[in-house]
Amino acid sequence: MSRTVKKENLEELYAKFNRDIAKRSRFYRLLLAIDQLGNVLLFNGSQDETISSYIGRTGKAKWLCNILKKIQGNHCYRSRGE
């Protein structure tokens, strides 16, 4: 039974990857990967989280959020979980 659950989870994961590829361009995904790398290098954050998401979640480096607000209002709050 657990083998079936794992297969279903794997199929859901593949579907998620396919949706992501269809939704975002290769360039956008590259920028996202660089952003996540920056989160690891600069803040020792998770490799699966962007800098904006980390700052929005932890409240560190609020000065950066203030800069990003000029580009997109409430950017750090909106990007939590990305």
Image: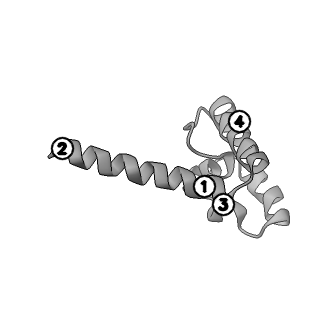
Between 8 and 35, the one lying in front of the other is 8
Instruction: Give the crowd class for mark 2: few <14, some 14-19, many >=20 residues within 10 Å.
Output: few
Instruction: Give the crowd class for mark 1: few <14, some 14-19, many >=20 residues within 10 Å.
Output: few
Q: Position of residue 44 (x, y in %)?
A: 59, 32
Disc 4 and disc 1: Cα gap in Å?
21 Å
At horizontal 56% and vertical 53% (from top left) the residue drawn is 18
Q: In the rendered image, which quarter is residue 77 located in?
A: bottom right
Disc 4 designates what residue? 38
Instruction: Give the crowd class for mark 3: few <14, some 14-19, many >=20 residues within 10 Å.
Output: few
Disc 2 and disc 4: Cα gap in Å?
37 Å
Sequence-wise, the earlier of marks 4 and 3 is: 3
**Horizontal relation, residue 34 to residue 54: left or right:** right
Vertical placement of 14 versus 74: above or below?
A: above
At horizontal 57% and vertical 36% (from top left) the residue drawn is 47
**Horizontal relation, residue 48 to residue 5: left or right:** right
Q: Position of residue 82 (x, y in %)?
A: 59, 54
Disc 1 designates what residue? 20
Disc 2 and disc 1: Cα gap in Å?
27 Å
Between 30 and 14, the one lying in front of the other is 14
Disc 3 designates what residue? 23
Q: SS of the residue at dot 4?
A: helix
| C-beta proximity under 8 Å, tags 2 and 4 | no
Q: As shown in the figure, which amino acid type bears the numbered disc 3?
A: Lys
Disc 2 designates what residue? 2
**Horizontal relation, residue 73 to residue 4: left or right:** right
| C-beta proximity under 8 Å, tags 2 and 3 | no
Sequence-wise, the earlier of marks 2 and 4 is: 2
| C-beta proximity under 8 Å, tags 3 and 1 | yes
Q: Which mark is residue 72?
A: none
| C-beta proximity under 8 Å, tags 4 and 1 | no
